[in-house]
Amino acid sequence: MSDPIKHECGIALIRLKKPLSYYEKKYGTWMYGLNKLYLLMEKQHNRGQDGAGVVGVKLSVDPGCEYFDRYRSVETNPIKDLFHHIFSTIDKHSKEHPEAVLDATWASKNIPFISELYMGHLRYGTFGRNSVEYAHPVMRQNNWKSRNLALAGNFNLTNVDELFEKLVQLGQHPKAYTDTVTVLEKVGHFLDEENERLFRIFKNERYNNQEISAKIKEQLDIQSILEQASRDWDGGYAMAGVIGHGDMFVTRDPWGIRPAHFYEDDEIVVVASERAVIQTVMDVKYEEVNEISPGHALIVKHDGTVSQELVRVPQKRRSCSFERIYFSRGSDADIYKERKELGRLLSPKIMQVINNNMEDTVFSYIPNTSETAFYGMVEGIREQLLIWKKEKIHALSNELTEECIADIIKVEPRIEKIAIKDVKLRTFIADDASRDDMVGHVYDVTYGQVRDQKDTLVVIDDSIVRGTTLKKSILKILDRLNPKKIVVISSAPQIRYPDCYGIDMAVMGDFIAFEATIALLRDRGMEDLIQEVYQKCKAQQNLPKEEITNYVKDIYRPFNDEEISAKIAELLTPEDCSADIEIVYQSVDNLHKACPNDLGDWYFTGDYPTPGGRKVVNNSFINYIEGVKKRAY
């Protein structure tokens, strides 16, 4: 992606079903689970670079011994810092107790993070500052094991205001106004209530307090806790949690917006945000990794029993299509196929744009995530070219010569690696003027492959959000090659509306498609429509989210996709660019053809799966008109 937008969070959980001594004997180390956790997190590094954290829970330690370990980091490389801290501690104990450390039981009782249960998290910051205090997992602590709770998730909730107020009405005093705190306290509240309910039952049955702790451990109803806690959540989430006595869960939103997958055998339970990560780390087949069903929770009890339980009524599946286009690792079999199909489906439009002129066209891509779509685009171009060749041969019929046939057959797309991603120099530059100058050097180009003022250069990108990097860097450096025309292809449709379920696309004014549409309205003397939509949005600002309509759609109604694309090209053309610029976007219909099981498209269509989404787009447009540059949730 040319525009740098932050990724989604990633979750990783490990539950060892056997004693640590089993893994020591079979795999040669009692760090088997910890090593797998490291791999799960490192393989999901694409999902968050702002921070990372790990919780380890020991299942069999005596009172007075630490059984709940946590470490979080917001260093430049948080995963490296995290595991350096953990492994340094292990190394220290190994040097101090070289004989004892060979015993898995001793290691579990005496060394932090030598546990049977792990939860890891990779964070990107959308809500709250980037400090260790905001890194996951977050915790509620208590002397009762079954009241200790750690949570980590890939989520954004749109109705933090409502949830916060409900916590206050419960008599709580939340320490911060964030979705993380409200979720932690909401789950914690019902965890406390479930503990109290069971305590009263067993007390009436004349069990003593120590016996009651064991009974609660056996009968704690995780499904009921999650059902009550999540009842008012509006947003996308894959929420993971561990409880001090050893229960573990991952619950998913009813629309399946945020992803979560798991693998289970008789030795281990593994959960991660992405299927391919589990396949790689555990060396298992595609069909052995399962998706946690929308609206369900995967619950792993302290004894290793695994089940999926209904927590909220599943809704029409609206899984995030940006996972398929960009966020998730392209090594997943389905995602790889879908990205290729996104490129292939664009080929008829591309052939139309270049007027079937293969001889004077060079095809390339903007590295690195659009590479797979590029392969699909080339396949599609070849399919279109085969049709052209057949038509050409049939048209010539009796006039065909061996030379003529050879000339037709040898026509192939000219494929070159033109753009090369270089170091991100802007990361180290503070002032705006210098940063803008350095942005022009983020990419380099391959010289000598484009003929001066003769060739059209077609480059595919996976999406265009703000267009800043295109204008300030990519188009400028491509223009150095002196092509006659540059055509930028987006394998995603026009991004028109803010996301509020996990992607860092929250401010309406940041979208080049929105900016272009506003410019078109002003060019054509239709500014009254902008004010009309503003007044409609303002009038419903204080309504319950369930009653809000997305009137921002009206802004786009006067124009077709091609008109908006043409204006985008005009706005993104650098002042000193000599090449003609054209931008071609994927259609929403083609997106759904390519990704038929992941129909979440609200950032393209404005069709939000939850009422909170409509509230967010309403407030985002108001913020734009009023000049308020902040998130609308």
Image: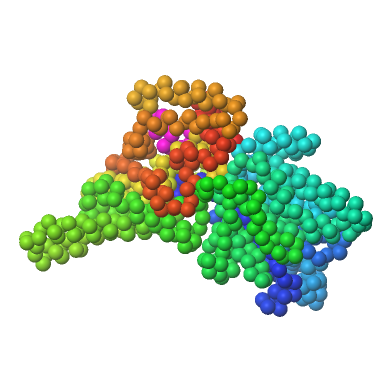
How far across and how far down the image is residue 439, in percent? 45, 45
Question: What is the quadrant of residue 266 in the picture?
Answer: bottom right
Relative to 25, residue 191 above or below: above
Position of 449 compared to 24: left or right? left
Relative to 249, residue 550 above or below: above
Image quarter of the C terminus:
top right
Q: How is the image coloured?
A: rainbow
Residue placed furthest toward the left: 399
**Of residues 625 and 278, the one drawn nearer to the viewer in this rendering:** 278
Magenta residues?
509-519
Relative to 605, residue 269 above or below: below
Relative to 279, residue 45 above or below: above
Residue placed furthest toward the bottom: 25
Q: Residue at 77% across / 55% down in the picture?
A: 220
Residue placed furthest toward the front: 205
Residue 280 within the magenta-colored segment of the rendering: no
**Of residues 22 and 309, the one drawn nearer to the viewer in this rendering:** 309
Q: Is residue 471 visible?
A: yes
How far across and how far down the image is residue 488, in percent? 35, 46
Question: What is the quadrant of residue 170 in the picture?
Answer: top right
Position of 351 compared to 37: left or right? left
Position of 371 compared to 124: left or right? left
Please state the total of marks drawn on the protein image. 0
Q: Is residue 55 visible?
A: no
Q: Residue at 26% across / 50% down in the picture?
A: 351
How far across and how far down the image is residue 320, in percent? 51, 48
Q: Residue at 72% across / 71% down in the picture?
A: 18
How far across and how far down the image is residue 609, in percent? 53, 41
The main secondary structure of the magenta stretch is: helix
Q: Residue at 84% across / 59% down in the picture?
A: 215
Residue 511 within the magenta-colored segment of the rendering: yes
